[in-house]
Image (cartoon, rainbow, N blue to C red):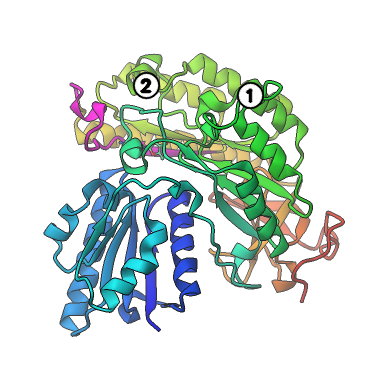
């Protein structure tokens, strides 16, 4: 049977889509290749959110195709996902070695199209059409056993698309209109995952806080998204629920109240700020002011003290003045995020912001990017340092990515903790004392706390 190598660019939604494609192909008898150079099929699952992400995938494809040609191999080459959707057949025109272009509503057709290509019945397939019901097709998982952290945590895709139309953002064009799966379908998937050993799920979508708006009316003042969280919360054996990515406007009182009421909903929230200037927030079409944003954070901290808060910020949006930028700096100082992803504005095809006047010079964007990163990293380091000496609960995910001789898990507030564990800790909830910090990492001491005792009453899933 053929082997496939999938490389993923971009967000967690892309990772999840790649996993679903891999699971689909494995179910058809494909093997997963360890490297692109030995695969019969190489698929790049692409990201369009900034130009650099697109360029990286194109360079990679040129490189893979060039090496294969030199070595006399002819693997099937495919682009999937957001850039496949936005560029479509331009990709095969520019890169004739590419055999397959699979849009964001077509992941479930990967096996069928690869069959055609491998059998030589077709030589090139480009499919970026819309497909009704595609939101319910990202369902299969690859949970591959004890040494794989995926058996402890899993991503669950709950919806696709976004109707917010922020003026900088390409997502409405690459992912289409908001379409949600049903609550019973999502709950059934989560239940199966828990039965297979998963203890934490992350509910995924481009704008999860708008989940199910058209399908489920408010019930006792609760949005469809809160109704979904409540239904997932019922699952016995599930310990933790996360979600991403939300929109700040979705943190209504019903969701904030849910944080106070539902213990499995961990104290961690992502709130993409984008800018601290009301003038820019309006130009960006974000739908909130800096004051409203700060108010949401205040409410979240009141219901869940210690909640971990992360954000996304864009610097260099068209027309951003030094005064606008300083408002962003000031708001970051005030709000003290645990983690901020700072992005340089990148003009995207078909977006209103790309046509706005006063596009800023690269040097200005670069300088603001540096200044904001310096500030937010310093503020984050203080948050991490403040945890030294405290005891935190972690869910052990597997060997540490930074140091494979150690193990790692995540706190409820979404911070990575590295500690000297072993395979028998995988999947356990442990209390650890934080001894020191590194760059966005906490180091826990196993000697201090009874490491063999799980925090919860649940059985150790994978004890050796
Ligand atoms: N340029 C730079 N950053 C962007 N993002 C989205 N679109 C752009 C763009 N055109 C950032 C936003 C978003 C994150 C996923 O990517 O901050 O929250």
Q: Is residue 125 above or below residue 287?
A: below
Q: What residue is rendered at 59% in x and 36% in y?
A: 269
Q: Nearer the viewer, residue 93 or 313?
A: 93
Q: Is residue 461 above or below residue 298?
A: below
Q: Specify the label residue 285 is tagged with.
A: 2
Q: What residue is rendered at 25% in x and 21% in y?
A: 319
How many numbered badges does the structure rendering display?
2
Q: Describe residue 182's horizontal placement relative to residue 78 as left or right.
A: right
Q: Position of residue 450 (x, y in %)?
A: 85, 61
Q: Position of residue 92 (x, y in %)?
A: 17, 60
Q: What residue is rendered at 65% in x and 42% in y?
A: 413
Q: CA distance from mark 2 to mark 1?
A: 25 Å
Residue 27 in view: yes
Q: Is residue 334 above or below residue 453?
A: above
Q: Nearer the viewer, mark 2 or mark 1?
A: 1
The quarter of the picture where the C terminus appears is bottom right
Per the image, the residue denoted by label 1 is 218
Asked if the residues shown at circle 2 and circle 1 are in contact, with their CB atoms under 8 angstroms apart, the answer is no
| CB at disc 1 and ligand 1 closer than 8 Å | no
Q: Specify the label residue 231 is tagged with.
A: none
Q: Nearer the viewer, residue 235 or 419?
A: 235
Residue 276 occupies quadrant: top left
- What kind of element bears circle 2? loop
- The magenta region covers 339-358
| Magenta highlight on residue 341 | yes
Q: Position of residue 55 (x, y in %)?
A: 23, 53
In which of the image's four quarters is ligand 1 placed? Answer: top left
Q: Residues within 10 Å of mark 1 (few under 14, many from 20)?
A: few
Q: Position of residue 315 (x, y in %)?
A: 34, 31
| Magenta highlight on residue 62 | no
Residue 153 occupies quadrant: bottom right
């Amino acid at each position: 049977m053929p082997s496939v190598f999938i490389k993923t660019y971009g967000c967690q939604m892309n990772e999840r889509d790649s996993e679903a494609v891999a699971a689909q192909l494995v179910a058809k008898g494909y093997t997963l290749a360890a490297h692109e150079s030995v695969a019969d099929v190489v698929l790049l699952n692409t990201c369009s959110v900034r130009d650099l992400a697109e360029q990286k995938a194109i360079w990679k494809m040129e490189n893979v195709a060039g090496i294969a040609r030199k070595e006399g191999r002819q693997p099937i080459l495919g682009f999937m996902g957001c850039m496949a959707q936005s560029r479509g057949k331009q990709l095969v025109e520019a890169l004739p070695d590419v055999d397959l272009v699979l849009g964001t509503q077509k992941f479930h057709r990967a096996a069928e199209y690869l069959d055609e290509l491998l059998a030589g019945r077709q030589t090139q397939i480009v499919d970026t059409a819309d497909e009704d019901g595609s939101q319910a097709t990202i369902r299969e998982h690859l949970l591959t056993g004890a040494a794989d952290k995926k058996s402890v945590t899993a991503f669950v895709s709950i919806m696709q698309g976004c109707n917010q139309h922020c003026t900088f953002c390409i997502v409405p064009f690459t992912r289409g209109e908001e379409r949600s799966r049903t609550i019973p379908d999502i709950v059934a998937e989560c239940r199966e995952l828990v039965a297979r050993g998963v203890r934490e799920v992350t509910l995924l979508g481009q704008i999860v806080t708008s989940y199910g708006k058209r399908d489920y009316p408010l019930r006792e003042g609760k949005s469809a998204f809160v109704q979904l969280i409540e239904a997932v919360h019922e699952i016995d054996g599930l310990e933790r629920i996360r979600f991403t990515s939300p929109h700040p406007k979705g943190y209504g009182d019903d969701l904030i109240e849910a944080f106070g009421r539902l213990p499995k909903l961990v104290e961690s929230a992502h709130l993409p700020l984008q800018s601290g200037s009301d003038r820019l927030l309006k130009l960006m079409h974000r739908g909130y002011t800096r004051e409203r944003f700060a108010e949401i954070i205040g409410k979240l901290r009141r219901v869940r003290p210690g909640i971990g808060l992360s954000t996304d910020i864009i610097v260099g949006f068209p027309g951003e003045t030094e005064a606008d930028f300083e408002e962003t700096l000031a708001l970051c100082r005030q709000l003290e995020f645990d983690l901020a992803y700072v992005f340089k504005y990148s003009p995207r095809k078909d977006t209103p912001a790309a046509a706005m006047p006063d596009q800023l010079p690269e040097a200005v964007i670069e300088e603001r990017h540096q200044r904001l990163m310096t500030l937010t990293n310093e503020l984050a380091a203080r948050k991490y340092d403040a945890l030294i000496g405290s005891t935190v609960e972690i869910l052990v995910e597997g060997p540490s990515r930074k140091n494979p001789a150690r193990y790692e898990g995540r706190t409820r507030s979404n911070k990575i903790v590295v500690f000297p564990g072993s395979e028998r800790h995988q999947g356990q909830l442990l209390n650890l004392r934080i001894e020191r910090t590194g760059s966005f990492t906490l180091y826990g001491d196993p000697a201090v706390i009874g490491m063999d005792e799980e925090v919860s009453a649940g059985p150790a899933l994978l004890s050796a």
